[in-house]
Amino acid sequence: MGFVTLIFLWIIAFVAAVNCQGGGGGGGGSGGIFGVFAIVLVLPIYCCYQCCAGKPRRSNTKFVNKTTTNDEEKQILDIQLFQSGHWESQYYQYNKWHGPHQIELSFDILLSKVTGSGLDDIGMYSIEGIYSTQTRRMGLIKKYQLGTGNPLENLGHTVTIQLEWNKYSNQFEGKWYVRTKKFKGSGNFKMHFDKRNQQAPFLSIYEKV
């Protein structure tokens, strides 16, 4: 439910409650009760929306480290899924997919951290985050560089991205979350390694064939 719709319903309910309070007609009491009930119902929904919109249920750390005990496959260390190099991403917003956009990512095997940078239709950005080879998940923070790209959309804001490997589509899939003064929301996000830029194994000139 949209923000404007919530405000509109709240105003209607409030006016109904005020107009019906103390009415001399036989239906005045029930109308007042309906108005108060509507306020009690709508107001918590609005407050919940303001609190939760654009905010993930769990932090990136909790999301990445959350394991499923009955899924033995996820307990296998899978380093091959997290390759440094060129990646392609797409995000869903305003009823359509945007991208693909290219991202340069670097994975630190020892620290289980990922850094990178990229450019999309919002602007230039940097990437910092964590990942797990056991859960096959990534938790990323995208920070846009103010003054680049679309001045109406780029507020120099941050975007939280939480992804999990989908073996059927052979890519990471999940959601993005944004909370700014102008917008609060979330949407689908998907990303995969661009194998076209994968370098061939290096063979030493001294290696015998």
Image (cartoon, helix red, strand yellow):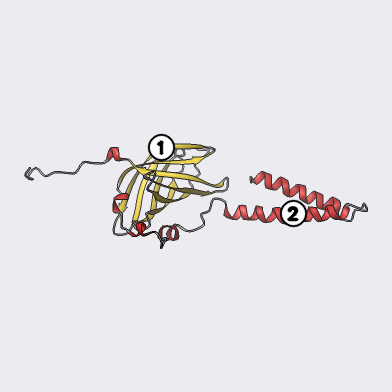
Q: Do the residues bearing badges 1 and 2 touch, measured as CB atoms within 8 Å?
A: no
Any mark on residue 100, and which?
A: 1
The answer to whether residue 150 shows anywhere in this view is no
Kindly state the secondary structure of the residue where label 2 is placed.
helix
The type of residue carrying mark 2 is Ile
Query: Helix or strand or loop: what does disc 1 sit on?
Result: strand
Disc 1 residue type (three-letter): Pro
Judge whether residue 97 can be spotted in this image: yes
Total numbered labels: 2
**Is residue 2 shown left or right of residue 27?**
left
Q: Residue at x 26, y 41 (%)?
A: 198
Residue furthest bottom as drawn: 69
The quadrant of the rendering that contains the C terminus is: top left
What is the x, y in percent for residue 37? 76, 56
* Residue 47 drawn at (x, y percent): 64, 55
Residue 67 in percent (x, y) is at: 41, 61
Label for residue 39?
2
Residue 125 lies in quadrant: top left
Disc 1 crowd, CA 10 A, few/some/many (<14, 14-19, 20+): some
Q: Which mark is residue 136?
A: none
Counting from the top left corner in percent of width and height, residue 27 is at: 88, 52
